[in-house]
Amino acid sequence: MRWFFSGKGDEGKSSLMDGIPIAKNNAAFELIGTLDELNAALGLAISFCEDKSLNDDLLYLQKNISGLMGVIAGFPLSADGSQIGLAKFLEWIEERIEYYGGDIENPKQFVFSGKTSVGAALDMARTIVRRAERRAVDYREITPNMDKSISAVLNRLSSLFFLMRLHMDLM
């Protein structure tokens, strides 16, 4: 077998860190897959982005969302095995919400995306992370000890992507 495929998933099963085969439509895989889509949407936003500060933030988000996928798969977020990385990520998101939302007035109506390519990609990211929030509820039902910070991170990310989009579209 080549490194880029194993054929092990041909029967509709795969495994997380523990190596136990589970169905690919398991709530953990649904959540991980949705976060993977989110990272792809962020990649699209990055490809359009000419704002260095925003681009740096998007790259940071991709890295940490990948780490979150690992946590759901059973890996620790930080090197020492603790979840402190998740708390720091949540704190960073809240700081960036304040930064991007600082000068933006509440539009008080639905705002359609499409004014800029990067804004539209960020709006896609916002809708994908909303789906991830719903998948996290399913995941929590089979994983009662799920870190509640996961849901908080996903909820804050949707606000952050909305404000980033408005920031880009109103520049």
Image: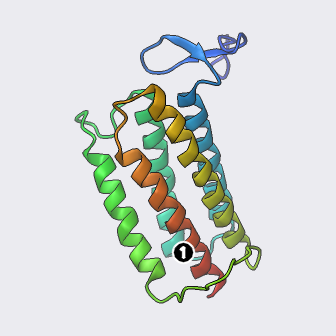
Q: Residue at x 66, y 55 (%)?
A: 41
- Above-or-below relation of 138 to 125: above
- Type of amino acid at the residue the image marks with label 1: Leu
Position in image of residue 60 (x %, y %): 45, 58
Q: Residues within 10 Å of mark 1 (few under 14, many from 20)?
A: many
Quadrant of the image for the N terminus? top right
Position in image of residue 164 (x %, y %): 55, 73
Position in image of residue 157 (x %, y %): 49, 60
Given residues 2 and 140, the one toward you in this image is 140
Q: Quadrant of residue 166?
A: bottom right
Given residues 9 and 137, the one toward you in this image is 137
- Above-or-below relation of 48 to 85: below
Left or right of 63? Residue 126 is right
Q: Quadrant of residue 5?
A: top right
Quadrant of the image for the C terminus? bottom right
Position in image of residue 101 (x %, y %): 47, 80
Q: Secondary structure at mark 1?
A: helix
Q: Residue at x 58, y 70 (%)?
A: 162
User: Residue extending furthest right?
Assistant: 114
Q: Residue at x 35, y 55 (%)?
A: 89
- Above-or-below relation of 28 to 105: above
Given residues 52 and 108, the one toward you in this image is 108
Q: Residue at label 1? A: 163
Its colouring scheme is rainbow
Q: Residue at x 35, y 57 (%)?
A: 90
